[in-house]
Amino acid sequence: MIISTSFVYAQESPITVQTDDNNYDEGDTIVVSGKVNTKIAGVDVVLQLFREGNMLEIAQIKVAQDGTFSHTILAEGPLWTNSGTILVRASYEVAGGTIAETEFSYTPKSEVVTTTTNFEVDAGSHGTFDVEYSIKGGEVEDMVVESENFALAISINSTDEGSITLELPREFIGAEKQDGKDEKFIILISSPDNPNGIEADYEEAPVHSDHRTITINFEQGDTDILIIGTYVVPEFGTIAMIVLLVGIMTAIILTRNKFQIKI
């Protein structure tokens, strides 16, 4: 009996199987898990992965007391050089054998699209500044300065899980301690499910005097990345002061006109 994943949770199936994602790139770790309805002592789950009928992987997996099983696979090696749809088959050889299947998409490094370019960011009265970036798994739609948050806001269209590497010029954005040494940036990633953002980690390349290079991972469906530092150009304080001065001057002019006496 073969059970497709579309029926796995609709009824009490003898065995279920799923992966932790629907898309993988070369070098990713694939986590396959599932559950058997009735555990039989001494019987293991046999896991097989196929692409176009060719077997990529086979493993024999022990079943836990609660009927669950799990296995990790590293997507690399001579059998993982071609892209395509990978069939995952889990079989539990009881009463003639029961099979559950699921699928995922796979892309080797040679076919992973990485975009590297510059984005011109508006810096108000300071003109513009360029942020060099590389992104895979999506595309950058916009970058804007959020002066009130000392932040750079990046809008992305994430078609898959991926990462973005940014070269942030110290002249325009940074995070520093009081002694002038580098401080960690705060990274918030937003999505339709988490519009307020979730704090995320990042990796940083060796220190450079002119810029800081950071890499941020994101998930499919993420829409915005906010990089918060301790300063950004133009600074909010300067803008606020200009707005305040303009407001005061306007008020003075209006007051003078109001009380001006014509002779």
Image: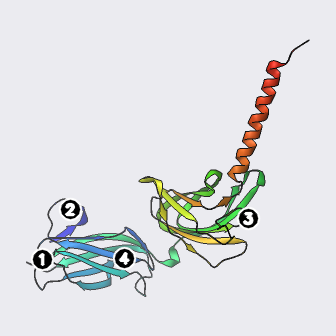
Q: Disc 4 vs disc 2: Cβ atoms closer than 8 Å? A: no
Q: Which mark is residue 39?
A: 1
Crowd rating for badge 3 (residues with CA inside 10 Å; few <14, some 14–19, many 20+):
few
Give the residue at x 45% y 80%.
27
Q: Which mark is residue 7?
A: 2
- In this rendered view, identify the residue nearer to me: 141 or 217: 217
Q: Circle 3 is placed at which residue position?
A: 171
Real-space Cα separation, disc 1 to disc 4, in angstroms: 24 Å
Q: Which of disc 4 and disc 3 is earlier in sequence? A: 4
Real-space Cα separation, disc 3 to disc 1, in angstroms: 63 Å
Displayed quadrant of residue 84: bottom left
Q: Is residue 250 left or right of residue 39?
A: right
Crowd rating for badge 2 (residues with CA inside 10 Å; few <14, some 14–19, many 20+):
few
Q: Which mark is residue 30?
A: 4
Q: Is residue 171 left or right of residue 107?
A: right
Q: Position of residue 171 (x, y in %)?
A: 73, 64
Q: Amino acid at mark 3?
A: Glu
Give the residue at x 27% y 77%.
70
Q: At numbered mark 2, what does the secondary structure look like: helix, strand or loop?
A: helix
Query: Foreground mark, 3 or 1?
Result: 3
Q: Amino acid at mark 1?
A: Lys
Q: At numbered mark 4, what does the secondary structure look like: helix, strand or loop?
A: strand
Displayed quadrant of residue 86: bottom left
Real-space Cα separation, disc 2 to disc 1, in angstroms: 20 Å
Q: At numbered mark 3, what does the secondary structure look like: helix, strand or loop?
A: loop
Crowd rating for badge 1 (residues with CA inside 10 Å; few <14, some 14–19, many 20+):
some
Tally of numbered tags: 4
Real-space Cα separation, disc 3 to disc 2, in angstroms: 57 Å
